Image (cartoon, rainbow, N blue to C red):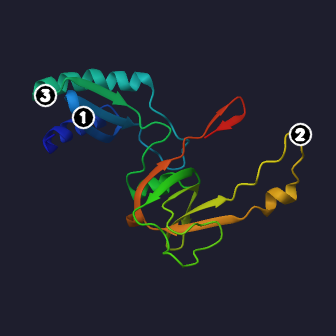
Amino acid sequence: MSTSYQAVIEQTVKGLGLDLVEVQRSAGGLLRVTIELPHVTGEPEQFVQVDDCERVTRQLQYVLEVEGVDYSRLEVSSPGIDRLLRHELDLARFAGEVIDITLKNPIGQAGQQVGQGITVSRRKFRGMLEKAEAGWQIVWRDEVKPAKPGAKVSQKKLDAAAVNALGFEWHEIREARLAPIVSFKGRGIN
């Protein structure tokens, strides 16, 4: 897709009071546009609704026809609960949230002690995103072995689970996304 078409799509989305996250062209002529509501620092997070997607779809269909953009199908959606973090500004926006990161290069090398709970050559991590002195860090607590059904687990045992932290900078990340943690009637599913 020509960057001029992407600029037209971005201008249209911005004109409707939304932010453009991504434009993708897929096989079969699918044109996928991902939108979100503008983020206001200090305000509660607001999410794209179906009405927003419909409004953008109707406007883009008109604009893309006028511009002569060749596509078979247009799909407008929100980034979703497992949204990709595309910029370092996204890290600042979602500090304090649980994220999944994949590093470009594995940590440590064979024979090298990396740290408690961190396996050598590991690339993928899930934990709480926090701002660190030099960049960012992800913090997680080791899993406590599940107790036998009906057995009580002491708070001491839960508190004894090791807390791990891994520092990183934006350029070391291959992919970062929000961890899709959903609660159905109080039961966390992730």
Residue, disc 2:
150
Tell me which numbered mark, 1 or 2, is placed earlier along the sequence. 1
The one nearer the camera, 171 or 68, is 171
Q: Residue 110: percent from the left, percent from the top?
A: 50, 75
Label 3 with label 1: CB-CB less than 8 Å = no
- The tag earlier along the polypeptide, 3 or 2, is 3
Which residue is label 3 attached to? 70
Q: Is residue 104 left or right of residue 81?
A: left
Q: Is residue 84 left or right of residue 66?
A: right
Gap in angstroms between the C-alphas marked 1 and 2: 51 Å
Q: Are marks 3 and 2 in contact (CB under 8 Å)?
A: no
Q: Kindly report the distance in space between the C-alpha atoms of the residues bearing marks 3 and 2.
A: 61 Å
Q: Nearer the viewer, mark 3 or mark 1?
A: 1
Rate crowding at label 2 as few (under 14), some (14 to 19) or many (20 or more) other CA atoms within 10 Å: few
Most distant residue in the bottom direction: 112
Q: Give the residue number, with chain letter if any, for mark 1.
A: 26
Q: Secondary structure at mark 2?
A: loop
- CB under 8 Å between callouts 1 and 2? no
| Quadrant into which the N terminus falls | top left
Task: Inspect the image, locate mark 1, and give the three-letter code of the amino acid beneath it.
Answer: Ser
Q: Residue at x 11, y 29 (%)?
A: 67
Residue at image position (58%, 50%) is 98
Taking the spot 44% from the left edge, 67% from the top edge, the residue there is 169
